[in-house]
Structures are given as C-alpha cells and as structure tokens.
Image (cartoon, rainbow, N blue to C red):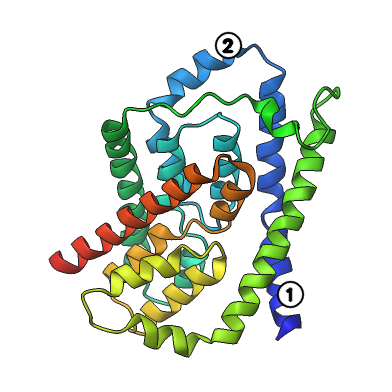
Amino acid sequence: MILHALEHAFLDTIRMVPFLLAAFLALEALEHYSNNYMNRILGKVGKAGPVVGALFGCVPQCGFSVAAANLYSGGVITLVTLLAVFLSTSDEAVLILLGNPGSGGVIAQLLIGKVLIGILFGYLTDLILRKKKEEKHIEDLCRSCGCSGHGGILKPALRHTLRLTVYILVFTLVLNLLLEWIGTDTLTAALGRDTWFQPLLTALLGLIPNCASSILITELYLAGGLSFASAMAGLCAGAGVGLAVLFKTNHPVKENVAILALLYVISAAVGVILEIFL
C-alpha cells in the first residue's frame, strides 16, 4: 500500500514541476521590471481576469491552479482570477472521461459549465466584495529563504520550485495513504445516493487537495453512484494541489481559510441548484 501510494504521489508531483517552475520564473522576472510598467499591464488584464482564469483553469491537470496559487501569493493576480481558476480546474476528470466511449457530450457540458461558473462567480465575487487584496510585493516570497538580492531569476526560481515540490510530494503521499486506508467503498457509502445533500458532501470531497478526489468523483459518476449535479459540485471544489500550494505560500492563513470556505459555498450551491433543475 505504501509503495502504491508513493508511486502515485511521485507521478502526481512530477507533473506539477513545469508549472511550478514557470510560475516562479514569472514571479522572479516581474521583480526585475518597472513596477509602473507592470501595473499598467496587469491593470488592463485585471478586468478580464475571471475570463482568462476560467479558460486556463479548464485545461486538464491542476497545473494552472498551482501556478495561480503562486501568482496570487505574489500579488500578481487578484482573488477573483484565482477563484475562477480554482472553479474551472478539472484536474484528472476530463482525461478519465476521454477514456470512456460516448462521453463527448458530458465532457462538453463539464468544461463549458465550469468555465461559465468560474466567470460568473468570479465577477459576482468581485461585485460583492469590492475589496482589493492587500498589496504584496514579489520579493516577499524570498525573504524567508535567503534568495532575495541575488542576481538573475533562474537560481531563486529553481530553489522555490524544489522546496515546494518536496512539500507537495510529502503532502500528496500522506493523502494517498489516507485514501488507501479508508477505501473507496467506505467513501461511496458515506456520500449517499439519490439524496438532496449529496452535492454538499461531494463538494467537501472535492476540497481534498489531490487528484485522487477528482478521479474518485469521476469514477463514481460514471458508475452511477453520483448525479451530474453532485459531480459538478465536487469538481468545481476540486482545485487539485493548488489549494495545498496556496496554504504553503500565501499569508495570512485566515485569508486562505476564507478562500477555501468561499470555494466550498459556491461549489455546493452550484450542485444544489443543478440538482433542483436537472
């Protein structure tokens, strides 16, 4: 069981490395440019943040949610952009559905639905909060690791990537061991079937920061154990390892807890609404 969990943890983690490195290279590069110039660029992109975030987030795998968590921690993207990425992230779901003949319609509904949900709730959150995230400078990410002040961007980016990769590997291994120990049958029974609160429970399952949750949700849906509404709730909440990265790199912790709660509330509400109308 330990070897199986370690194998999956390693494979899941290694796929994140290119996205981690790209995100940290972007953060380090931005530090070397004029703040005024970058503010003008980001100001123009900012209003379209939920649209851009939702479109990138729907790409299979959770690499973009990992990158978004890093960029948000560095103050490069806004909360609404981060939320749009998290809501539209499909992780392994699309890849699993592609392996099942006749799932084309479901894939289209899933992707279009998650993109629309990401855009809608991204702008809705912006409208409700009307509160800018506290200013963070990119160099804040370097204060605790001793890499600030060094010339070049590759060495600090590699150092950040290595540290975060180790963190993700350990975190993923622990979660895989827990899921192996609990068992999918136990989880299936706990989620219930044909009940009104199933989307609420599935959204909680989706919050597990690991691709195992999206795999389990998709497999349960294909087996008939979950409704489409419940699967959508779980997959909207499932931002993959991005949530773990957010808690690792972003401070204060209470802000991350608030983002987690907001992600759950939106995902659960989407599931319940779909359950009622579908």
Q: Which residue is mark 2?
A: 37
What is the quadrant of the C terminus in the image? bottom left
The tag earlier along the polypeptide, 1 or 2, is: 1
Q: Secondary structure at mark 1?
A: helix
Residue drawn at the location 49% of the way across and 85% of the way down: 184
Q: Is residue 58 left or right of residue 143?
A: left
Left or right: 112 as drawn, with respect to 21: left
**Residue 123, horizontal then vertical, whole percent:** 30, 36
- Disc 2 marks a residue whose amino acid type is Tyr
Label 1 Cα crowd, 10 Å radius (few <14 / some 14-19 / many 20+): some
Image quadrant occupied by the N terminus: bottom right
**In the rendered image, the vertical position of residue 270 relative to residue 276, given as above or below:** above
**Which is nearer the eye, 44 or 124?**
124
The quadrant holding residue 139 is top right
Residue 7: mark: 1
- Amino acid carrying label 1: it is Glu
Query: Residue shown at 80%/37% (left/top)?
Result: 145
As rendered, which of 135 and 150 lies closer to the eye? 135
**Nearest the eye: 119 or 143:** 143
